[in-house]
């Protein structure tokens, strides 16, 4: 393409399409989080962007696909955070803490919040397997980080499955109660919660054998 050509290159057109598709998803996810999935229509999303609903169909086939894309983005953000934590320097406990902080932060952002606030029951039967598969991958990644920290002795030996459920449950809730316009930013909320949770995983000293009074004298 000549430098002064009025026509956009294929790469520029692809970038424009990706940006417009992202704008639709971002507008939709914010409405889903504020109003609820069932109370939000694609007409509402289109109006907020100053476009027609027909325009949305150029980028996404249905409201169900919009929701699936939104939750997939949030779940992939969590998977990326787990992968990054596993490659970082430090102890197993330090890598676990890094992931848990990012886990909480992501769940207080738009797409992660949608995963928690909407849930699989809003998805169609065709979309749920993909959602469940991604959630299983995140659970597996969390369990592996826990197992690594137990193996190097930086957290106490614990039931990995139940601990993963407890940590995820605690760090999912800020998606429902945290106010983005509040005084405490997401990173501060995440750091505080993770600090509280991990103190419960501190290794305990093994008690020594009991001695009778005559043995101590």
Image (tube, helix red, strand yellow):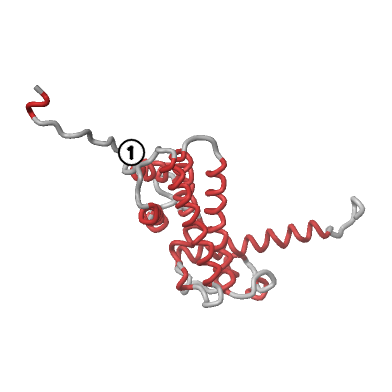
Check the picture and name the quadrant holding the C terminus: top left
- Residue 69 image offset from top left, x and y in percent: 58, 65
- Residue 201 image offset from top left, x and y in percent: 34, 43
All told, the count of numbered labels is 1
Residue 44 vs residue 72, the one in the foreground: 72
Residue found farthest to the bottom: 125
Say which residue label 1 marks: 203
- Residue 184 image offset from top left, x and y in percent: 40, 44
**Quarter-of-image position of residue 43:** bottom right
**Quarter-of-image position of residue 26:** bottom right
Residue found farthest to the right: 2
Q: Check the image and report above or below for 125 versus 136.
A: below
Residue found farthest to the top: 217
- Residue 41 image offset from top left, x and y in percent: 53, 74
Which residue is located at x 47 percent, y 36 percent?
Answer: 91
**SS label for mark 1:** loop
């Amino acid at each position: 393409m000549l430098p002064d050509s009025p026509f956009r290159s294929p790469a520029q057109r692809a970038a424009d399409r990706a940006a417009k598709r992202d704008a639709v998803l971002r507008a939709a996810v914010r409405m889903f989080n504020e109003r609820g999935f069932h109370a939000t229509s694609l007409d509402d999303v289109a109006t907020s962007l100053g476009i027609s609903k027909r325009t949305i169909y150029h980028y996404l086939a249905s409201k169900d696909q919009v929701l699936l894309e939104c939750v997939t983005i949030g779940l992939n953000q969590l998977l990326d955070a787990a992968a990054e934590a596993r490659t970082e320097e430090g102890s197993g406990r330090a890598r676990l803490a890094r992931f848990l902080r990012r886990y909480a932060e992501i769940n207080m952002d738009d797409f992660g919040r949608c995963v928690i606030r909407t849930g699989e029951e809003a998805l169609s039967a065709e979309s749920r397997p993909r959602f469940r598969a991604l959630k299983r991958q995140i659970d597996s990644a969390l369990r592996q980080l826990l197992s690594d920290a137990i193996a190097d002795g930086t957290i106490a030996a614990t039931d990995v499955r139940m601990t993963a459920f407890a940590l995820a449950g605690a760090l999912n809730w800020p998606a429902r109660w945290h106010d983005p316009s509040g005084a405490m930013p997401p990173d501060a909320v995440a750091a505080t919660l993770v600090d509280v949770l991990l103190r419960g995983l501190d290794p305990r000293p093994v008690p020594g054998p009991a001695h009778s009074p005559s043995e101590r004298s």
